[in-house]
Amino acid sequence: MDMIRTPSETRPGRMAPLARLPVFLALEGKRAVVAGGSPAAAWKAELLSAAGARVEVYAETPSDELLQIAGDPQRGAIAVNRRAWTAEDLAGAAVAIGAFDDDESAAMFAEAARTWGVPVNVIDKPAFCDFAFGAVVNRSPLVIGISTDGAAPVFAQAIRAKLEALLPKGFADWAAAARWRSALKASGLPFSGRRKFWQLFTAHAISNPDSEPTQNDFERFVAEVKGLGAATENGSVTLVGAGPGDPELLTLRAVRALQSADVILFDDLVSRDVLDFARREARKMLVGKTGFGPSCKQDDINSLMVSLAKQGKRVVRLKGGDPLIFGRAAEEMAACKAGNIAVDVVPGITAAQGAAAKLALPLTDRKHARRLQYVTGHAKDGALPMDLDWQSLADPATTTAIYMPTKTLAALVAKAVEQGLDPLTPALAIARATRPDQAVVAAPIGELPARLAQAALPGPLLVMLGRVFSEQAGAQNVARADQKAG
């Protein structure tokens, strides 16, 4: 008898401790004080000017770099005062930056700044700092700051270089298109329509980062949203493949869907590491479906999914592997269409692909396998499906991946051998494919059920058989022989 469970919300984990609180200061037109004239002080003055601050530098001997930057500031004016700083110079400043060689001078400056209630940073002296500067990726108004709390600045610079390579320069133009907000409010679109506008905007920006946003783009997005009519009041459902377990196998589309979701309905088979990519504010609801374990009814999942979308929510239905391969996607898409809910599918790496890649094994081979097939190990009632194509299972030139075979493998193998499958066909059973605790049992298919009974592998389980696995099976047998000899 099936054990029934109801959908349950998973509370987000507590925020992990932060070495630094990432804060972006609005310095436009505000006064910033820099004490010192070194090249390091010049760089900080340029950074403050780029953020729009009015920078006042106090330095008895300003460096050439500082004078050059002051003569051609990025945004905010930079005034160089050729004298030492005084405590009164800090009054009314938004921030204070000091460049000092000795701790005594640094301590005096930090104490004076704090007396006036001014946040202070002393370059390369973290003991006197209220805040730190991180490595900066500048696609302004899109700005990314990276901090290692001063522990590994070279590492932070390496991460910045990676992000610089990943983010097209054109993102700056698209981020600046937030100027459309006032025009969008005047367009007459309701809140749901404006949200749909920004979804279209974002999708287009990511696909066309090097094209400059134009008024035609704005008008086209507005017209498209208006063409949807009342449908914009509804939310949407996206079926997302989470892959077999390793979160690094998520596609970029899957990550974007998770980061824009209002609600995520996920299965037991989804690795919790995958949920770390989701928007923190999203509700995460376990609608677990596990073979021969407690499961939510499919009709309940369908109803919940459609109901949430009709409330205007962006719903992600997160499934292990690929949603179109033994993932009940057809039933869920049909429920969405019946409810007039827009539905999209983001494919994922299915378990057979992930397991084969992890083991560096081919699924097809010009010498051994001309065909690849995926079959399910159980029917809707949990029993062995009797309508399998047994001749195709027996085909020696075919690689077969059997999903969810835990309870039925012995009966499936017996029936397939009866129908012509060679019991010596190499086979692999893979538990928790692609995860750190992945486990593999290799044996001829005729022996595999007994071997699995002894091994008692945890789920989820996948069985693959075919001549392409002969080398892997041989290696496993050699390893067992060496263990016995030892």
Image (cartoon, rainbow, N blue to C red):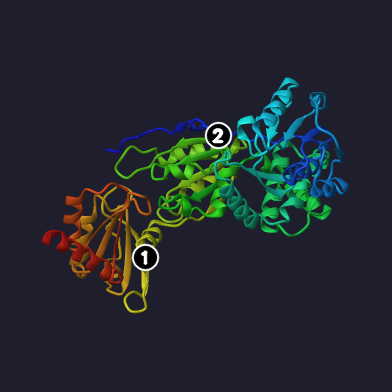
- The quarter holding residue 122 reads top right
Under tag 1, what secondary structure? loop
Q: Which residue shows up at 12% across the image and 59% down it?
A: 484
Q: For the C terminus, give its image quadrant.
A: bottom left
Q: What's the residue type where badge 1 is placed?
A: Ala
Q: Which mark is residue 260?
A: none
Q: Position of residue 391 (x, y in %)?
A: 27, 70
Q: Which mark is residue 19?
A: 2
Q: Which residue shows up at 37% across the image and 50% down it?
A: 435
Q: Residue furthest left?
A: 485
Q: Which residue shows up at 62% across the image and 53% down it?
A: 163
Tell me the crowding category of disc 1: few under 14, some 14 to 19, or many 20 or more residues within 10 angstroms, Cα based: few
Is residue 111 found left or right of 20 in the rendered image? Answer: right
Q: Position of residue 193 (x, y in %)?
A: 72, 41
Q: Residue furthest top?
A: 115
Tell me the crowding category of disc 2: few under 14, some 14 to 19, or many 20 or more residues within 10 angstroms, Cα based: few
How many labels, in total? Answer: 2
Closer to the camera in the image, 249 or 318: 249
Q: Residue 47: tell me if it is visible.
A: yes
Q: Is residue 142 above or below residue 471?
A: above
Q: Is residue 419 above or below residue 349?
A: below
Q: Tell me the residue that label 1 is attached to.
A: 360
- The quarter holding residue 59 reads top right
Could you tell me if the residues under marks 2 and 1 are in contact, i.e. CB atoms within 8 Å? no
Under tag 2, what secondary structure? loop
- The quarter holding residue 298 reads top left
**Sequence-first disc among 2 and 1:** 2
Closer to the camera in the image, 178 or 221: 178
Closer to the camera in the image, 167 or 121: 121
Q: What's the residue type where badge 2 is placed?
A: Ala
Q: For the N terminus, give its image quadrant.
A: top left
